[in-house]
Image (cartoon, helix red, strand yellow):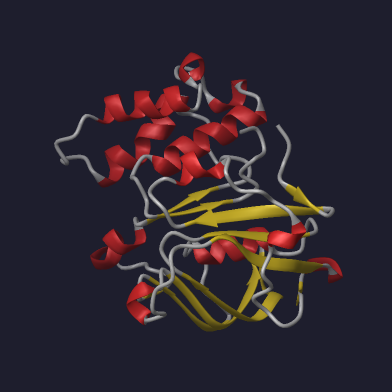
């Protein structure tokens, strides 16, 4: 497969819906679909820019109260994951409501993955405030872990553990976070692998798989805990 591309720009996606996967193929990616949510493009790494932060599908109208905000960033500045002191984007104001699908477009190295990394709570904003379901992010306390698990992230390269099989990678969130949930993790993992056409690879380790199939396994792992918010870094690559 190929990555989603709009007018020469690679895209990242995020959705806030329990039916993210079934609706991905309904989204038409075209520059005219993007609604600019910032007055000017945000300066990115190596002088490039995140050129669009746009909503591609919206829910029915509702009052914009804090209770209806899934993601809310207020005057946020973010750094690069590998060089935290370097500012990738600043003065970011971003609000996402349940049922919305968003796309982030920009040239390679402009900071799209860094924005999703911050949204996933893997690093804090340099300045400003970021809330997920009303909770200040990042969430590091075990007492607030349930809030953190309402969000899932699919990395661009899958980020699988090479010493585990594909089946074990997908099952890992269930076994780690829900060891006594009374569910059948094997059945759920089997269903996810079947949906991603990964059953023939279930006993293989990631290093023996093509990159595109590793990406599918990363998506299956992110869906294992049934997150309410799903962040996808270049999701159409290999899907």
Give residue 237's position: percent from left, percent from top: 67, 38
In front of the other: 160 or 196: 196
In front of the other: 200 or 140: 200
Up the image or down, 70 lies above or below 102; here it is below
Residue drawn at x 64%, y 40% as measured from the top left: 236
Give residue 141's position: percent from left, percent from top: 31, 68
Which image quadrant is residue 142 in?
bottom left
Q: Is residue 63 left or right of residue 145?
A: right
Image quadrant containing the N terminus: top right
Q: Which residue lies furthest to the front in this view?
A: 60
Residue drawn at x 72%, y 67% as measured from the top left: 52
Image quadrant containing the C terminus: top right
Give residue 104's position: percent from left, percent from top: 66, 61
Which image quadrant is residue 213 in?
top right
Residue 161 visible in rendering: no
Residue drawn at x 56%, y 61% as measured from the top left: 117
Residue 51 visible in rendering: yes
Q: In this view, does 189 lie to the left or right of 34?
A: left
Q: Is residue 174 left or right of residue 125?
A: left
């Amino acid at each position: 497969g190929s990555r989603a591309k709009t007018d020469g720009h690679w895209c990242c996606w995020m959705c806030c819906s329990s039916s993210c996967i079934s609706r991905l193929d309904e989204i038409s990616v075209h520059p005219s679909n993007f609604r600019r949510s910032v007055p000017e493009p945000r300066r990115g790494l190596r002088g490039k820019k995140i050129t669009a932060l746009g909503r591609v599908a919206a829910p029915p109208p509702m009052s914009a109260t804090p209770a209806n905000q899934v993601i809310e960033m207020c005057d946020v500045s973010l750094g690069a994951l590998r060089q935290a002191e370097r500012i990738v984007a600043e003065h970011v104001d971003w609000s996402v409501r349940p049922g919305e699908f968003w796309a982030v477009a920009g040239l390679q190295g402009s900071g799209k993955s860094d924005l999703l990394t911050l949204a996933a709570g893997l690093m804090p904003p340099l300045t400003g405030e970021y809330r997920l379901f009303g909770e200040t992010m990042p969430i590091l306390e075990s007492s607030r872990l349930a809030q953190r698990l309402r969000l899932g992230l699919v990395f661009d390269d899958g980020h699988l553990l090479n010493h585990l099989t594909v089946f074990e990678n997908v099952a890992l969130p269930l076994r780690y976070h829900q060891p006594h949930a009374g569910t059948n993790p094997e059945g759920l993992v089997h269903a996810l692998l079947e949906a991603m056409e990964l059953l023939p690879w279930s006993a293989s380790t990631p290093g023996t798989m093509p990159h595109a199939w590793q990406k599918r396994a990363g998506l299956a792992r992110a869906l294992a805990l049934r997150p309410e918010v799903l962040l996808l870094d270049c999701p159409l690559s290999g899907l």
